[in-house]
Image (cartoon, grey):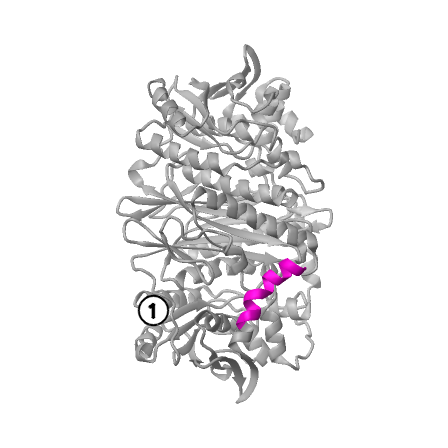
Amino acid sequence: MSLEHQEIQNLTSKIGRTPTHTEIQIVSAEWSEHCSYKSSKKHLKILPMDGPRVINEKGYDSGVLDVGDGYIITAHIESHNHPSAVEPYGGAATGVGGVIRDILSAGTRPIAILNGLRFGDIKKDANARWLFKNAVTGIADYGNCLGIPTIGGEVEFDSSYSKYALVDVAAIGFGKKENMINNHADIGDVVVLLGGHTGRDGIGGSQFASDSLESENRSAVQIPDPFIEKMIIEAVLEARNQGLIHAMKDLGGGGLSCAISETADALSVGIHVDVDMVHTRENLTHDEIMTSESQERMLIITDKSKLEKLETICSKFRITSSVIGHITKGDVIHITHGDMTCANLPASVVANAELLDRKSQKPQYLEKIQKNPKLNHITNHTETFFELLTAPNIASKAWVYRQYDHEVGIRTVIKPGMDASVLRLDNGKFLSIKIDGNPKHCYINPREGAIGCFEEACRNVACTGGTPIGMLDHMQFGSPKDPEIFWTFLESLKGISEYARYFKIPCVGGKVSLYNETPDGPIKPTPIIGVIGLSGKRPPTNTISSGDYIIIVGKTQEEMGGSEYMEYIHGVIGGICPAVNFAESKKNMAAVIEAVNYNVTSFAHDCSKGGIAVAISEMSISSGIGCDVIIDDIPKCDMTAENIIYSESHSRYILAVNPEKLNALQDILKRYNVTYGMIGRFTGDMIVFSKNKDTIIKTKLDVLKKAWEESLEEMIRNG
């Protein structure tokens, strides 16, 4: 039980009597932070959630966007942090399963998965390596078994995640608008539970995820079975095609307790459920049945005349189904155990926890952070550059996405590895997707850091020619009871909302995950932003030729705070965090999108972690062609050489352009009045950066490529 004394009093007052033990268990699940959002819900209203493409329907667990020609895409993001920190394989795998069912509940076929992973210091921490390897394997095994491509994501390591893990999973669905589930229910409709058998795994999972992680409660971690999930997907879509589904919801956090109460509340109906009718894999009490979070289960409402056809489809796909109840008048959820009443509660009470007004206070640590920290003098820039490029957060993540089948389903046009991934849609359009986060920036300046995460995801989408049409946000912080932590949440939320309103990018889904901390302390503020872009043109293949010019779009500022260079090379936390100039961001992004769509660039790449030096080197590594860069020609303020090449200022893009298309590109850049500079060429087999004709960095491309590609895997293997 996780209800506080005041909440029990509140429940007692609302129902006018002492609640039964089962009722307390049901409400404990639904009123947990994980399910109710009681600390954050009142603040989330500042996010813009409407737009010309947004389709709002009651009861959906995923966002819906109209992509034209009668087609829609659905999108959602979830996390499985606590379970993954305890049992990374099962925790990460069931995180994938849950978000896939959220997509399915709208009546769309899941077509892609993305993930965001965060762990402790992989170089020093054996536990972080164990968590990392097993979480990746769990995601890979589950997604690969489903035949759904994992097309992208991000990985980050930081000591604030010591003994912990953040496992974020996003999913995209696709379908025809006419096939959407129009959630409704009529009196007498039957309630069907289909899928896996209910067991003791995951009991109390929502409460477990709504407090700091202090023990390894493995019983709260669900057991994955992707083969049942695959059959559920096919069965549900066939039932949808035959018009057999009135309403549908997946069983995630809180199990039956939340699925039943939220469905009844959303549809303004009552539901009677007899727990004796639930198919189980072991002997369970009625309380355990109501709060189990066993995976691969869906709740479907249909009418009696359609029940036989639904059961036939379930039998065809070898899925167990049970009629566990029916729709009643009013709004009461009535739970019985045979003839005995276990719970009899208004759905509106259960599904709507009292929202809390948490205190917030600017963290004291922000006052102590050095504004202009002094860094050690670098004498060997090539050696430093080599060290940075092979750092855990910058080194190639190919080891991760090699585990995933990112081409199954034949929609993948641009694979993971550089900027956004791209999917081909049936209406001839192309969907770009990317998720990004930067806890280093967000720790130093939560508002500007969160805006920067948003803009980075937009930049990645722009590099494939996609125009952002929607976003997902996932807000991950420590305990909301700590006013300083709650302040960082509010600041991050304000920044995201501000950027979304300015660019008219609606929030179509999200998640708030709090209590992400261990006895060692809270995680750094970690908002994750996913951006969805749409283009009417197939993105060009990124192919650099020897002699292509290197163009940088955007101005480089002396904003070194939270940079990989400052923290990884110098071990210094502080400085000025990069800030986004909205007007500059807008015109730079528009110019790059047009340049990519008109095919006047050979390669477009955003400039982020590691700065210009890393961005250009990644392009050289990808193409197998070296570069000769003159940093004097970079649009910038007065800065040292290392600050110029390692600054992580936003709104910047690196473009490769064939000499024959240079004039066309410059015409676009001038028309948008963007700041840009021609700073070198792709040529030869060396990586060379120079300033005032003095060589700063010089190294062989093949040596650098080998180190960049192998360093992460070597850390995993050798520790």
Residue 445, picture quadrant: bottom right
* The furthest residue to the right: 519
- Tell me if 424 is positioned left or right of 649 in this view: left
* The furthest residue to the bottom: 693
The reply to whether residue 361 is in sight is no
Q: Which residue is mark 1?
A: 595
Q: Position of residue 588 (x, y in %)?
A: 40, 68
From the image, which quarter does the N terminus lie in?
A: top right
From the image, which quarter does the C terminus lie in?
A: bottom right
Residue 370, picture quadrant: bottom right
Q: Position of residue 219 (x, y in %)?
A: 65, 33
- Which amino acid type is marked by label 1? Ala
Q: Position of residue 493 (x, y in %)?
A: 53, 51
Q: Nearer the viewer, residue 454 or 315?
A: 315
Q: Nearer the viewer, residue 595 or 107?
A: 107
Residue segment shown in magenta = 705-719
| 318 shown above or below 49 | above
Residue at coordinates 59% horizontally, 23% vertically from top-left?
282
Q: Nearer the viewer, residue 132 or 643?
A: 132
| 245 shown above or below 647 | above
Q: Position of residue 501 (x, y in %)?
A: 43, 54
**How many residues crowd around disc 1 within 10 Å: few (fewer than 14), some, or many (20 or more)?**
many
Quick one: SS at disc 1?
helix
Is 715 one of the magenta-colored residues?
yes
* The furthest residue to the left: 69
Residue 376, picture quadrant: bottom right
Residue at coordinates 58% horizontally, 29% vertically from top-left?
292
